[in-house]
Amino acid sequence: MKPIKNDLILRALRGENTSRTPVWLMRQAGRYLPEYRSVRAKAGSFMDLCRTPELACEVTLQPLRRYDLDAAIIFSDILTVPDAMGLGLSFLENEGPVFERPLRTESDILNLHKPDVMKDLKYVFDAITLTKKELDGSVPLIGFCGSAFTLACYMIEGRGSKGFPRVKELLYSRPELMHTLLDKITDALIDYLNAQIDAGVDIIQIFDTWGGILSTGAFSEFSLTYTERLIQGLRLYREDDTRIPVICFTKDAPLAWYKMYENIGADCVGIDWRHDMDVVAAVVRNIALQGNLDPMVLKGSDEYIVQRVKQIIDMAGLRTPHIFNLGHGMHKDIDPDKVELLVDTVHSYSEERKSLIHC
C-alpha cells in the first residue's frame, strides 16, 4: 500500500506530536456544497448515490478539492448495514431515514437476515478502492460504521425518534432479546469493517449517535460492551504491522464516559461541543481527543469563528494529541467559505502556536 504523504492525523492517533493540529470534519462531503447537490441530483436518490461507487468516490473527494483537509471520509451512511439485513431503507425528503420493515416482534429479531457483506455491501468497498486510487496516497481515508446500539435504535423504531421509546421498552422489558439483537448487529459490523480495512481504509470511526439517551449503567451494558467487542473483532494490523487506528464518537456523552474509551481498545475519542476540551483533556490522558466545535458556530461572524477555533486549540493544549473536528455533523445550509476559514485557521494558528512553544 502506497505511503501516506500527509500523515498528520495518523501520527496524532499514535500519540505523536505534530507540527500543526490536523483537521477533518464530520459530514465534510454533503449538502452545503453546491457540487455535491449537483451530483446528488444526477444520482436520483441518496441511496443511489451511496450505491454508485463512482459517484460516492466523487463526493468523497469534493471537499478535499476546496479545503486543505487532512483526511477524507468515504461517502456512505451508517444505515447501509441494517438495509443489507433486510429492513428496506429509504430517505424521505424532510423526514430522513425510514425503514420499510422495522423490527417489531421477537420473531423479527430472531429471524434477522445475516448479510453477506461482500455481496450486499460490495458498492461500499468498490467506492473505497476507487477513492484510494484517486487519493494516490495524499491523505488517509476514513471508513466508518454506526455502533450496534445506534443501529438498533433505528431498526426498532423504524426512523429517527425523540427518546426512542420502543428501544427503551425492549431494553428494559426484554434485555436478553436486546442483547440477542446487539450480538447479531455486532457480528455484521465486524465483517463490514474488516472488509473496509481490506479495501484500503486507513482509519475507522464508530459513530454512537444515540448512546447518550442511556443511563451510565445501560450505556455500559448495551452500547460500550458491543463497541468493545466490535473493536476486538477487527483486523487492525496490516502485514507490515501498521495499525488501523479507531476513533469512537458518542453524542451527548457525560464527561465520565469519555474515560471509558481508554479501556476498550480505542485510539481516540470524539468530543461533542457540550464539554470544554481542557476539562476532557484532564480526564482522558492516554488516547487522542477529537473535536469539538459546535457546527452552528459556522453561522457566526468570521471573527467569532476564528475566536472559537483558537479557544478550542488552546484548551486542547499541547500535551494531548488533538484532531480538530466539529462536535457533530455539518449542517446543510452552512456557507462553504466559513468552512474554508475554519480549516485555514486551525492550520495557521496551531502551527504558529506550536512553533512558539518549541522556539
Image: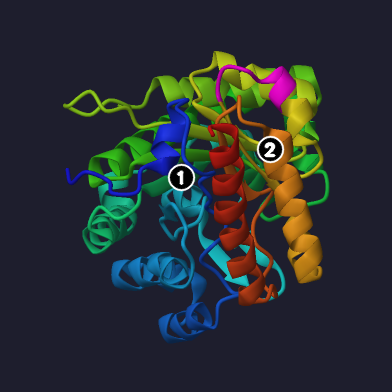
Question: Residue 35 at what x, y percent from top left?
Answer: 48, 82
- Mark 2 vs mark 1, foreground winner is 2
Q: Quadrant of residue 168?
A: top right
Q: Which residue is mark 1?
A: 144
Question: Residue 80 at what x, y percent from top left?
Answer: 46, 53
Say what amino acid the circle numbered 1 marks.
Phe
Q: Quadrant of residue 175?
A: top right
Q: Which residue is mark 2?
A: 271
Q: Which mark is residue 171?
A: none
Magenta extent: 281-287
Local secondary structure at mark 2: loop
Q: Quadrant of residue 122?
A: bottom left
Identify the residue at image location x=51%, y=44%: 20
Point out the image quarter for the N terminus.
Answer: top left
Judge by depth and name the residue closer to the eye, 250 or 242.
242
Question: Residue 170 at what x, y percent from top left?
Answer: 73, 31
Picture layout, residue 115 above or below residue 262: below
Local secondary structure at mark 1: strand
Residue 306 seen in the figure:
yes
Q: Report the Cα–Cα distance between label 2 and label 1.
A: 17 Å
Q: Residue furthest top?
A: 263
Look at the image and say whether residue 244 sits in the magenta stretch.
no
Judge by depth and name the residue closer to the eye, 94 or 67.
67
How did the renderer colour the structure? Answer: rainbow
Q: Residues within 10 Å of mark 1 (few under 14, many from 20)?
A: many
